[in-house]
Amino acid sequence: MDPGVVAQLQKAHRDAGAAVVGFGDLAAGQSLVSDDDTESDDALANSDPAQSERDRLFARVASDPRQIGLFINDFAGGCRLLVILRIVSYASRSLSGAVDRLVDANVQKQATRWDTPCLDRLLTRVRLVAATLDALLLYGSTAAQPFFLGHAETRLFAKFSELRVSELFSIIIDYPDSRQAIADLRTCVVRQRSMRQMAHSLRNAIQQRLLHPGATTSDILTQYISAIRCLRLLDPSSTVLEIVARPIRSYLRSREDTVSCIVQDMVSEESELFEDLASGHGVIMDNGAEGIVYDEDYADKNWEPLPIEAKT
C-alpha cells in the first residue's frame, strides 16, 4: 500500500477518534495477528464497546492485508481521479447516498437491542468509514475541509434517535433491562435538542396503546410507574415526565377502580408501586410489624418549579 495513503488514513482516523492500532503496518503487507493472538468474540464483548469494534475491524483487515491494501490503493486512485477531473462535487451526492445507506442499515440492525450499549459502537464504525472517505478524497489537498464525517455523524444521531423514540413505549415496558437503550437515547436527544418532540411522540403512543378500555387499571398503573422511572433518567428536569404523565393521570381519574388498585398495590409487597415507594422514592418507607411507616420529611428540599415547556 502507498505509505502516503496509509499516513493520510492514520491521521484521519485519529482526528475522528477511531484510530485502528497497527494500521500503518499494512503498508508493508504484513499480517499483524495470528490465530493465537486473536481475541474471542466473548473477550471483546467484555471490553470497551468502541475499542472492541476497532479490534474486530482490525482483525478482519489484518487477516488479509494484501487484499485490503490493493482495494484501498485502487479506491484512492479513483478518488484522486475525481479530484484531478474536478468532479468531486458531482460525485458527492452519490457518495453521500452510499454513506446514508450504510448508516441506515447499521442503525436498523440495533432494533430491539436494548440490553447493550449500541451508540458508541455505531459511532466508531461510521467514523471509520466516513473518515476514510474524507481522507482519500482530500489526499494532497490543504484547502478542502472534511465533509462526510460530519454528515455521517449527523445522519447517525438523527436515525438512531428516530429508531429509539419509536421503540420507547416498549423500552419502558422492558425497564430495567432496557437501561442501556435509555442511556443511548438520552445522548441522542440531548445532542439533537429533541427532548420535547420525544415527549409528545411518547404521549401519543401511550394514548393509542395504553389508555383504552382494553387495558386494565393495574396494567396502566404498572406502565405509569415504569414511565416515571425511565423518564427520570432521560430528563432529570421532569419536563418530559409532566408532558407524558398528564393524560395518564387524567384517564386514571375516570376509572372507578383506580383508588382501590392504588391502595392494593401500596400494601402488596409484590407490587411495583410498593417497591418504588419502599425504595425511598415514594412516601412509604417500611411495612414493619407496627404497620406502614411514613416518611415525615419526604418533601424535596431541592424542589424547583417545572419549566414552561412542561405545560405544553
Image: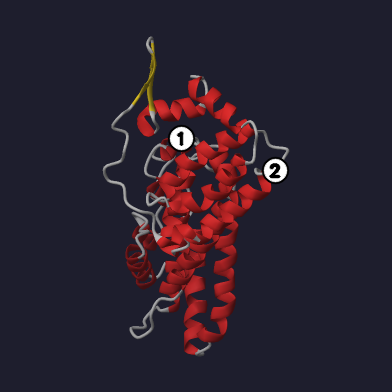
| Tag 1–tag 2 contact (CB < 8 Å) | no
Mark 2 residue element: loop
Q: Residues within 10 Å of mark 2 (few under 14, many from 20)?
A: few
Amino acid type shown at disc 1 = Asp
Spatial CA span between label 1 and label 2? 44 Å
What residue sits right under mark 1 in the picture? 42
Q: Is residue 214 left or right of residue 22?
A: right
* Quadrant (top left/top right/bottom left/bottom right) for the N terminus: bottom left
> Is any atom of residue 301 visible in this view?
yes
Seen at 59% across and 43% down, the residue is 170
Residue 57 appears anywhere in the view: no
Mark nearest the camera among 1 and 2 is 2
**Outermost residue, right side:** 214
Could you say which disc has been placed on residue 212 in the image?
A: 2
Question: Within the image, what quadrant is residue 102 found in?
Answer: bottom right
Picture coordinates of residue 91, whole percent (x, y)? 56, 81
Q: Amino acid at mark 2?
A: His
